Image (cartoon, rainbow, N blue to C red):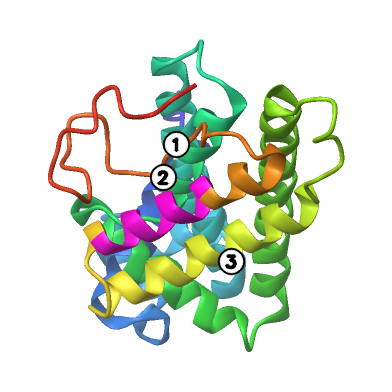
Amino acid sequence: MPRQVDHAGRRRLIAEAVCRLADERGLEGVTLRDVAARAQVSMGAVQRCFRTKEEMLVFALGHIGEQVMDRVQARLVRSPAQSAGTALGHAVTEISLLREEHRAEARVWLAFVAQAAVSEVLAGTLKANYATLHEAFTRLIAEAAEAGEDADGAGRLDARREARTLLALADGLTTHVLIGHLTPEEAYDVLHAHLAGLWERSAGSTPRAEAGPPPAGPAPDGTSTRGRTRG
């Protein structure tokens, strides 16, 4: 009886091999042969999963996005009663890829962004990912602003524009930390200050969300982050 092949699992295995090679060599150094060797599968297995290198790269890019979003969801599940403002702070912290354990992922992500500048297919995948994040940020900002508004505060915030700004800020901080222009602590402080200003512009109220390291990690001021985020 023929051996059953887990094609979805094999595609993920190949995507992880692509990411490891991209981290070491950049995307220019990723070949189908090297990916097969790193994934410990045959060239034929790679070609049965992906017809071209570009198709393989598109899947690998989507794989990275799924990993980040899975972490965002896991972070939110750990605190199911949090407000939209707190959820936004957690989400933007995760997608910024600022923590040391996500440094390799940040390098690979930026390698894909650079390649997307000359690849319409990769650019299309990235634009779709950004559009999804933009919609999620817009919804959370609108919900948080509405929850904190008084009668005079309605309509004070353009949620779509603020979401666009926050998404661009998160991407920029990823780059600045990766090249060493900012430390992760300095980047977290920038995120926290931006979110604080966002809620102040929303309704003249006290901030309801803070960006920072994971709950047990050091905050930019050196104190524990447990209990600092307000819902």
* Residue 190 x/y as whole percent: 39, 60
Mark 1 highlights which residue? 90
Q: Nearer the viewer, residue 114 or 162?
A: 162
* Residue 113 x/y as whole percent: 53, 75
**Which residues are the magenta region?**
186-196
Query: On the picture, is 149 further left or further right than 22?
Result: right
What amino acid type is highlighted by mark number 1?
His
Magenta span main SS:
helix
What amino acid type is highlighted by mark number 3?
Ala
Q: Does residue 17 belong to the magenta stretch?
A: no
- The answer to whether the residues at label 2 and label 1 have Cβ atoms under 8 Å apart is yes
Viewer-side label of 2, 3: 3
Q: Nearer the viewer, residue 81 or 24?
A: 81
Report helix, strand or loop for mark 3: helix
* Residue 38 x/y as whole percent: 25, 62
Q: Within 10 angstroms of label 1, few (less than 14), some, or many (20 or more) residues?
A: many
Distance between the alpha carbons at the discs numbered 2 and 1: 6 Å
Report helix, strand or loop for mark 2: helix
Q: Which mark is residue 168?
A: 3
Viewer-side label of 2, 1: 1
Quarter containing the N terminus: top left
Mark 2 highlights which residue? 94
Q: Does residue 192 belong to the magenta stretch?
A: yes
Q: Nearer the viewer, residue 154 or 160?
A: 154
Q: Number of numbered discs present?
A: 3
What residue sits 41% from the left and 87% below the top? Answer: 28
